[in-house]
Image: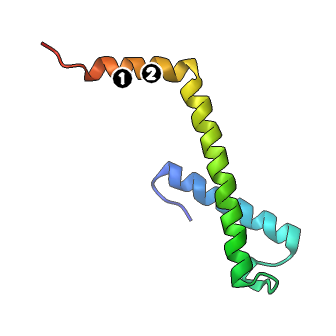
Amino acid sequence: MKVACPTTQRVIDKMVDRANKGMAKFGMTMSERDDYTPLRLLREAQEEALDLAIYLEEAIDRLTLSGKYQEWRNREKLHILPTH
């Protein structure tokens, strides 16, 4: 599937790659697995979401503490100052 938005296309490509890796590893699709009850699916998703929150927090910390971010932020403040 091809879409116009390059960002969306990269996400689609990554999803296809991940699905193919899952097939290679497990030999079946997620919908073919019978060992994942609805509760297990929700718990797995919750664990992934919690991991995501940690990764996001660390990335935000690294970005906001970097010199480049501070330089950009200072430049941004200059642009929003009222002009007289």
Front-lying residue, 13 or 67: 67
Q: Quadrant of residue 83?
A: top left
Specify how the rendered protein is coloured: rainbow
Label 2 sits on what residue type? Trp
The answer to whether residue 54 is above or below residue 73 is: below
Residue 1 falls left or right of residue 15? left
Confirm or deny contact between disc 1 and disc 2 (CB under 8 A): yes
Judging by the rendered image, the residue that carries numbered circle 1 is 76
The answer to whether residue 69 is above or below residue 18 is: above
Residue 34 falls left or right of residue 72? right
Residue 74: x %, y % from top left: 40, 17
What residue do we see at 54% from left, 28% from top?
64
Residue 34 falls left or right of residue 38? right
What residue do we see at 66% from left, 66% from top?
46
Assign a secondary structure to mark 2: helix
Judging by the rendered image, the residue that carries numbered circle 2 is 72
What residue do we see at 62% from left, 37% from top?
59
Assign a secondary structure to mark 1: helix
The answer to whether residue 83 is above or below residue 32 is: above
What residue do we see at 74% from left, 77% from top?
40
Residue 57: x %, y % from top left: 61, 42
